[in-house]
Amino acid sequence: MAAKIASDQSTGTFVPVPGETEELKARVAARVVAIRHLEPTDRPSWPEEAGEAKRFNRAEADIDFPLDAVGTDLAALMTIAIGGVYSIKGTTGIRIVDMRLPPEFAAAHPGPQFGVAGSRRLTGVDKRPIIGTIVKPALGLRPEETAELVGELLSSGVDFIKDDEKLMSPAYSPLKERIAATMPRILDHEQRTGKKVMYAFGISHTDPDEMMRNHDLVVQAGGNAGVVNINSIGMGGVAFLRRRSEIVLHAHRNGWDILTRHGGLGMEFSVWQQFWRLIGVDQFQINGIRVKYWEPDASFVKSFKAVSTPLFSERDRPLPVVGSGQWGGQAPETYARTGGSTDLLYLCGGGIVSHSGGAGAGVRAVRQAWEAAVAGIPLADYARDHPELAQSLAKFADGKGA
């Protein structure tokens, strides 16, 4: 089966064709270089392919693709190495679990423009996580109402605010009007305090030219970040934007779950994220510890490690964005399970804005939780002298949702 995959994805044909030679095949054919047998299973990933079988053999296969056959184009890489394997007959399940690229890919693609260091520089945050929150579209806020909420958040001491991924340019809040209402408050806050809070506006659009116009609206208003829904606009859309961008590109992975949720199908995040990092996203949204969605904690840990590990150099690391039902309570485990990292954007929605003492207290509570986590102090002990954290524990602990 591994040999069939290698053949079908490179030089294999159903019948011999003119010009097909063994020399040609040897130069551009993919080849199986290793097979590691795994424990069999009694559960096929595609039950309709199982027939009457009750036992299904499993293995990991390493397949090498010649650079001559693929080149460094990411669309070619996705098509040749990954795109067709799911259609091959004879399998009851297949998953792409790893991908290792040669250095030619580093030279061919720009990678992040800002990444970890640039995000820290623009937010003025060092030696701790960047603390962020979200403007949710379910509220139906109009531009001026959004600006009022942003004004409250600015005074809270938050470092980063973003539009929810579903908030792009709806009729009730056109992007142009939302930017015009919001950015003056951000710039006024910067003028008064010296701190420029990063606001990532939802600039995604099917039409790359329209997306660039959205980008330009942010730049002209003095903004420095945009949310891009990478699965919705595709690799070509992100590449078009990255070549021209002057702002931090905050990648939301909406739709990613379709590609990975079944453990015996699709692909690992460690594979998929490489494409977007090479293209050049600066911040990469993943999930977190004890999220409100399906993803288990172990999967988050693997995703965090994948994004944080250089592909070729430190410069190609985007900033991991930890989110989904987060509040200060997950800080100690997040810190421990990410190897003691504070190179992250900790994104809380209700965990900040629904705090009993208001958004400002919510931000302080999250910072206090991270201070305790880094110092190795139990949250309950730290909360004795930190009332905002104590309020947060009272409201969100014991499985209460944030």
Image: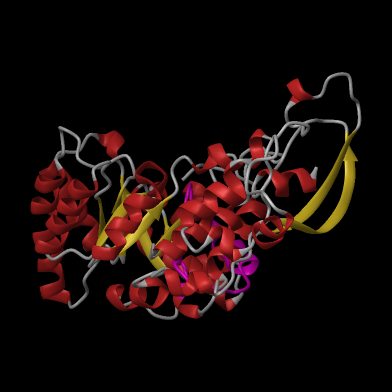
Nearer-the-camera pick, 98 or 184 = 98
**Magenta stretch holds residue 360:** no
Examine the image and state in which quarter residue 190 appears: bottom left
**Magenta stretch holds residue 341:** yes
Farthest residue to the front: give it.
18
Q: Position of residue 82 (x, y in %)?
A: 60, 47
How many callouts does the rendering have? 0
State the extent of the magenta-drawn residues as a range.
316-345
Name which residue lies at 68% across and 53% down: 97
Q: Position of residue 58 (x, y in %)?
A: 84, 43
* Coloration of the structure image: secondary structure
Quarter of the figure with the N terminus: top right
Compared with 86, 371 (above or below) is below
| Left or right of 184 in this view: 75 | right
Does residue 289 appear anywhere in the picture?
A: no
Nearer-the-camera pick, 395 or 287 = 287
Does residue 42 appear anywhere in the picture?
A: yes
| Left or right of 224 in this view: 64 | right
Examine the image and state in which quarter residue 206 appears: top left
| Left or right of 246 in this view: 46 | right
Q: Position of residue 309 (x, y in %)?
A: 57, 71
Name which residue lies at 36% across and 51% down: 236
Nearer-the-camera pick, 352 or 146 = 146
